[in-house]
Image (cartoon, rainbow, N blue to C red):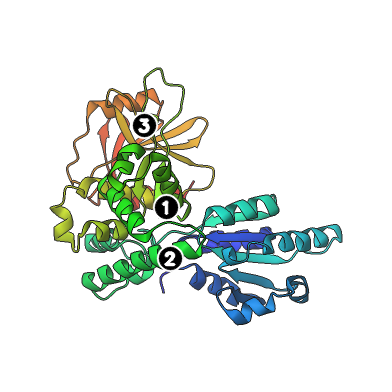
Amino acid sequence: MLQRWIEEKLEKAVKRTPAVALLGPRQVGKTTLAREIAEKRNSVYLDLESQEDLLKLRDPVSFLSANSDKLIVIDEIHRAPDLFMTLRGLIDENRRAGRRAEQFLLLGSANMDLLRQSSESLAGRIHYVYMSGFNILEVPNSDPDDMHKLWLRGGFPDSYLASSDEESMEWLEMFIRTYLERDVPRMGFRVAASRLRILWTMLAHLQGETVNCSKLGNNLEIDGKTVAHYLDILVDLLLLRRLSPWYGNVKKRLVRSARFYVRDTGILHRLLGITDHDALLSNPILGKSWEGFVIENIISILPNSVEPYYYCTSGGAEIDLVLRISSMEFWAIEIKYGVAPKIKPSFHQASEDIKATKKFIVYGGTDEFPIGKNTTVISLPGLMGKLRGL
């Protein structure tokens, strides 16, 4: 078992908030982590994909009230959205009576219905914790090959822990097919699996770029609004990252469109037919794949108060990742895979535009060293170690 970075964060949330939603794509390890949390206290576990557990909730008020002294873990909560109103009533009744409110740990594959239901029904009573795949702090990283393995295979536990790259890619292929053919329809989205697969693959080729929905729609023989809807589905299911552009008061013409990243690099590589590290190194997607890998690792450990953006002017000056640490502190992060990264002068100009307080170059090496102009070249684990202290 590998220690998950968010376990401590989840423990704290469960102790202080009546309801906690642990959200993330399927197969990312939510159930395993929730069971570990539940084993440490008096608890009851319900899986709403189980007919037996669904039967227990035929009269949810009676069952949940009878277990009010326990942590109640409800897996696949999106399969019973009507439960949110029941949970709200129980929490509020205990608050009015001055009793300790029931503790609910709700697990779900994030989607629009789940977030809408919980935000409307449990506003002020629920805390969200988002779970991604393994990040570089959760796996052995003393050897560069360890990082390369995580980068190639992605962070889904079954993919990363596979006995070989070939087995990992087979698992990823089955994951993609199952998600598109079974899970997406079961979550209420009416989308042709073949069409969504083609769009997902197109987005893989456009990793880290802005997208033209009308152009993609022409290729798919659908309109741009439908493409935008499909993008929303992939984003809501935490399979696609929509990185917003910097919106600060800068007296330059800025690119205003979001950039999109396939969040898990294992899925990215499977969609593109990249099966091993040598094939990745020779593929034109190398730089953007590394960029997405670094961004996802960094965002996975950010506190909720830190906001991620990218910065790009119409003249081409850009910063791959801007972190708004506070109203007075901004970090500019450039991402280069090579061990001898070359930095364009426009990066420093862009950093001045946003008044960056710190500048980092995340590269493929392991050392940390300054290169002037208040800029530090650093490894991915090194930068994440600094962010962990925020």
Residue 326 in the image: above or below residue 121: above
At 32% across and 61% down in the image, what residue appears?
A: 154
- Image position of 340 (left or right of 29): left
Count of marks overlaid on the render: 3
Residue depicted at 74% across the width and 76% down the height: 63
* Local secondary structure at mark 3: strand
Distance from the alpha carbon under mark 3 to that under mark 2? 30 Å
Identify the residue under disc 2: 28
- Mark 2: give few (<14), some (14-19) or many (20+) Cα within 10 Å: many
How far apart marks 2 and 1 lie (CA) works out to 16 Å
Residue 243 location (% of width, % of height): 40, 41
The residue to which callout 1 is attached is 234
Rendered view: 384 above or below 49:
above
Amino acid type shown at disc 3: Tyr
State the image coordinates of residue 138 (x, y, percent, origin top left): 39, 63
Task: Give the mark nearest the N terminus, 3 or 2.
Answer: 2
